[in-house]
């Protein structure tokens, strides 16, 4: 996960803008993308990036209409 922190923030801002669509949100929350976000949350120390990751996760949960059992029972929900 190397790269410019501003690039990461911009990418996460982009995801914030698209996950408000429930079909996009449903697809992403039930994919490996969610695991990547959780991994980023555990490893990244930059506050601006952590805030954006939390925001994306929150928006995914808020706008998803279908959350598969695997995701509902994962470490994200605990």
Image: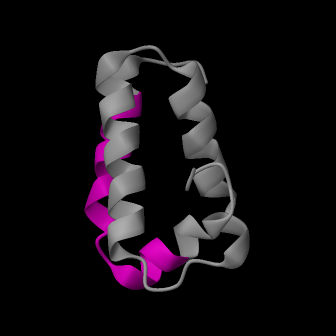
Q: Quadrant of residue 53?
A: top left
- How many discs appear? 0
Q: Position of residue 35 (x, y in %)?
A: 66, 49
Task: Left or right? Give the position of 66 relative to 6.
Answer: right
4 shown above or below 77? above
Task: Left or right? Give the position of 68 relative to 5.
Answer: right
Task: Left or right? Give the position of 54 relative to 20.
Answer: right
Viewer-closest of 8 and 30: 30
Q: Position of residue 75 (x, y in %)?
A: 65, 49
Q: Is residue 19 visible?
A: no
- Magenta region, main secondary structure: helix
20 shown above or below 59? below
Q: Is residue 76 visible?
A: yes
Does residue 25 belong to the magenta stretch? yes
The residue depicted at 57 percent of the width and 50 percent of the height is: 78
- Quadrant location of the N terminus in the rendered image: top right
**Magenta stretch in the rendered image:** 8-26
Q: Quadrant of residue 70?
A: bottom right
Viewer-closest of 12 and 67: 67
Does residue 10 belong to the magenta stretch? yes
Query: What colour-coding does the image apply?
Result: one colour
Q: Position of residue 20 (x, y in %)?
A: 28, 71
The residue depicted at 33 percent of the width and 69 percent of the height is: 62
Q: Residue furthest front?
A: 78
Task: Left or right? Give the position of 77 relative to 19.
Answer: right
The residue depicted at 63 percent of the width and 44 percent of the height is: 36
Q: Position of residue 76 (x, y in %)?
A: 57, 51
5 shown above or below 24? above
């Amino acid at each position: 996960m190397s790269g410019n922190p501003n690039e990461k923030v911009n990418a996460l801002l982009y995801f914030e803008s698209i996950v408000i669509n429930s079909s996009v949100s449903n697809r992403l929350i039930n994919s490996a993308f969610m695991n990547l976000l959780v991994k980023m949350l555990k490893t990244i120390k930059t506050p601006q990036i952590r805030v954006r990751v939390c925001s994306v996760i929150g928006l995914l949960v808020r706008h998803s209409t279908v959350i598969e059992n695997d995701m509902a029972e994962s470490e994200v929900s605990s």
